[in-house]
Image (tube, rainbow, N blue to C red):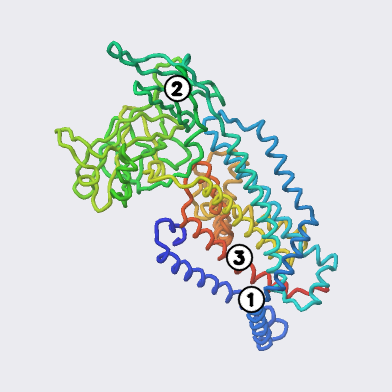
Amino acid sequence: MVLEHAETLPLEVWFPLALLKWLLVLGGVAIAGLMVGWLSVAMRRGPVAGIRIVGRLLAATVGDILHISPRRVWALSWLAVRESIRRRVVVVFAVFIVILLFAGWFLDPGSTHPARLYLSFVLTATSYLVLLLALFLSSVSLPADIKSKTLHTVVTKPVRPSEIVLGRICGFTAIGTLLLVTMAAISYVFVVRGLSHTHELTDDDLHAVQHHAQGQPAVREGLTSRVHRHRHLATIEPSGRGRIAMEQNHWHDLEIEKSDGKTTYKLSRPRGMLVARVPVYGTLRFKDRDGKDSKKGVNVGDEWTYRSYIEGGTLATAVWTFDGITKKRFPESLFPKGLPVEMTIEVFRTYKGDTDDPENIPGIPGSLSVRNPATGEMVEAVIFTAREFTTDVVYIPRRLQTPDGNVLDLFDDLVSDGKMEIWLRCVQPAQYFGAAQADVYLRARDASFTLNFIKGYFGIWLQMVLIIGIGVLFSTFLSGPVAIIATSGALVGGVFSGFMMRLARGEVIGGGPVEAFIRILLQQNLVSDMEPGMRTTVAQMLDVVLGYGLYVAASILPAFGEFSFADHVAYGFDISGAVILKNTCRAAAYLVPLFVAAYLFLKTREVAK
């Protein structure tokens, strides 16, 4: 639990607690393993002999690990690299290139969120290919060497079992890293070039939209040329300055050049499309339609309970409390428009109004108010219009005027000890806003997209290393095909570990595995209770037993979904250093016992057999 909240805790707080918890768990598993080993030996040779043999094995384990030779590990790693090349690992790279070559036919740069589409594609494709490569390489390596007698030549040399295991892990990690770096570089070029475009704008595209006094220039507006299935609205001010409106989550810088009485308009490459926002999140609470505190909003019938809804035209409110809001963090020189607020509000309509164009349905008005949590002073700051599938960007002015005419300073009057509240309400009656905690945030700054892209591939690298460790472990005591199946099961179980945990706790609608299977056979809905009787009782009892197994499996297996940063990169959010450190520590916490367990299995296995 400490690691899960690493983003909000400083390193000196969560790391010692997480390390202590890991040592306790690892010690408990080690003691349980020693007890099982002692019992198995004691049943054959007696309890005293069991203690002696287990003691010798424990001493040998400590000695082998402490006396690992880096030179021999390097030699065995290089042997694993050569073996991987011999197993035609380059085929995976060729498949990746072919996928990118044909991807241009299917990826639409004119979609609503083209950057999200491209980034999700390259990260997902790379992840699948690299993980499959790691799975097959690590699972079949040792069984194949044992079957072909290749490993016999190795064990006759002065090498330790721990060095063999570590050499395999390091070798497969090296070849996988080289492949992943190459794929990341190609993917970056593919995304940047696939999204890169510009538009043309001429004087013939512009027309006057505002008349001034005689002799004064007018504001001119017009649409750019159509590229990637979209146009931009261009506005030329009387002063000669121009701006390009945002479309598809990007805009272009406009440069105006005048030469020999002719005006040339040059638009830059897209801006704001490949970003890495640094958000400041708050904690969310709700108030019901009467203005009273509530644990959550109303349910509008959506099966996905991620968001709660507030009713329009009432006192129902979603309240975010932010901390660390200071002038130093949001200086006026960098934020002249005010405090930047970005929102992804889901709109639930009970009616859509009168419109002949279903693609031009009017938005739903909403309001943002700022409140001082200490004094209770509150001012309505922004009126906005929310639309589906759109990120709204608004600015809370630094100076706000109250209904009685007083002017309040945002940081001096509405922020107390860095804390500030933002109240969201839906203005239109009979309509609803849906919101979750991460849907409203303050955009503190933008980090480097290139660095964020590299962090996304680092998450794939962590998953790859874990799969290699699991595959090497299973390959030390299972045959090749069985090791592949076991590693695949660990991968699938890790991907769905969160669902397994909710299933074990009874938090999934429809009951446990047995009950859900019966509902499928009988075509029963998930909400209503099953008919009481022997069948229902037996199913629920079996689900309780299976729940314990699912809980253990979900607790042991790595949650591979938490190591993936694809959504962070695709949706344009910076991956913080705390998240990187947390997942790196988590991966290391798995790799250490995997290495020790693989060593023990290989040491106790009779290779000559």
Residue pointed to by mark 2: 258
Residue pointed to by mark 3: 591
Q: Residue furthest front?
A: 260
First along the sequence among labels 1 and 3:
1
First along the sequence among labels 1 and 2:
1
Q: Residue furthest top?
A: 214
Residue density around tag 3, few if under 14, some if 14–19, many if 20 or more, within 10 Å = some
**Image position, residue 594 (x, y; %):** 63, 67
**Which residue is at a point 34% across and 43% down the rendered structure image?**
334
Q: Nearer the viewer, residue 303 or 184?
A: 184
Q: Is residue 587 visible?
A: yes
Contact (Cβ within 8 Å) of mark 1 with mark 2: no
Identified by mark 3, the residue type is: Leu
Q: Which mark is residue 36?
A: 1
Identified by mark 2, the residue type is: Lys
Disc 3 to disc 2, how far (Cα)? 64 Å
Contact (Cβ within 8 Å) of mark 1 with mark 3: no
As helix, strand or loop, the secondary structure at mark 1 comes to helix
**Which residue is at a point 58% across and 43% down the rendered structure image?**
519
